[in-house]
Image (spheres, rainbow, N blue to C red):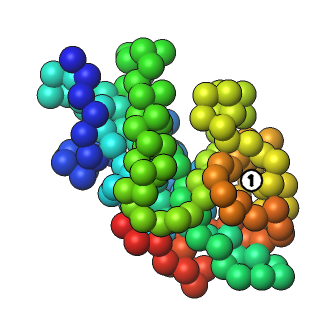
Amino acid sequence: MIVLQPLASIDPAAVESLLDRAFGSDRHARTAYKVRGRAQAITALSFAAVDDGVLIGSIQCWPIALDMDDGPVVPLVMVGPVAVAPDRQRDGIGRRLMARTLAAADEGAADTGAGLMLIGDPEYYGRFFGFTADRTALWRLAGPVERHRLLARGAGIPDAAGDLGPAVHAGATVPA
């Protein structure tokens, strides 16, 4: 039976191994890693899927910020990566992890008050979780991104130009 539990209860080496299997060992060069920088994951929004004592999935969330050109620094939460063991993909594990994280965010578990963003498939994340690219067209990132895959969800998502990056570097903080 698959159990969802706090990611903090899992050995970090097991999480890193899962991420390597799901995304490859070159994953650190991806734009998402540059956006979140060296921030610590938000523990209240990060979960693991465990089946019979084996880690088969994980989701992490990160404090980031949009440093708007003509305005304040707006705290956001970056959702992802959502990783599922390759032999367990298409079993609905990623969807369960995402639903758990969004429920925790909606319940105010991390007390951030921040909108959520991610880089992902707009058809999937839009259809099942309400993420859109409607307000992200003017955001700048520290790496390449397909604009239609830069998605956001929640109240207060700015539709303004600005630099998306780590909260700790953008002058904002989001409590864990």
Q: In the image, is residue 35 above or below residue 169?
A: above
The location of residue 160, given as percent across then percent down, is: 83, 67
Name which residue type carries label 1. Pro
Is residue 25 visible in the rendered image? The answer is no
The location of residue 155, given as percent across then percent down, is: 66, 57
Q: In this view, does 57 lie to the left or right of 133?
A: left
The residue that appears at 60% across and 80% down in the rendered structure is: 170
Along the line of sight, the residue nearer the viewer: 121 or 44: 44
Is residue 87 visible in the rendered image? The answer is yes
Q: In the image, is residue 106 above or below residue 176?
A: above
Q: Is residue 119 left or right of residue 112?
A: right
- Neighbour tally class for label 1: few under 14, some 14-19, many 20 plus, Cα within 10 Å: few
Q: Quadrant of residue 48?
A: top left
The residue that appears at 67% across and 41% down in the rendered structure is: 131
Q: Quadrant of residue 56?
A: top left
The location of residue 145, given as percent across then percent down, is: 74, 49
Q: In the image, is residue 148 above or below residue 114?
A: above
The residue that appears at 68% across and 27% down in the rendered structure is: 127
Image quadrant occupied by the C terminus? bottom left
The location of residue 40, given as percent across then percent down, is: 38, 65
Q: In this figure, which residue is indicated by the disc labeled 1?
A: 144
Image quadrant occupied by the N terminus? top left
Element carrying mark 1: loop
The residue that appears at 70% across and 76% down in the rendered structure is: 67
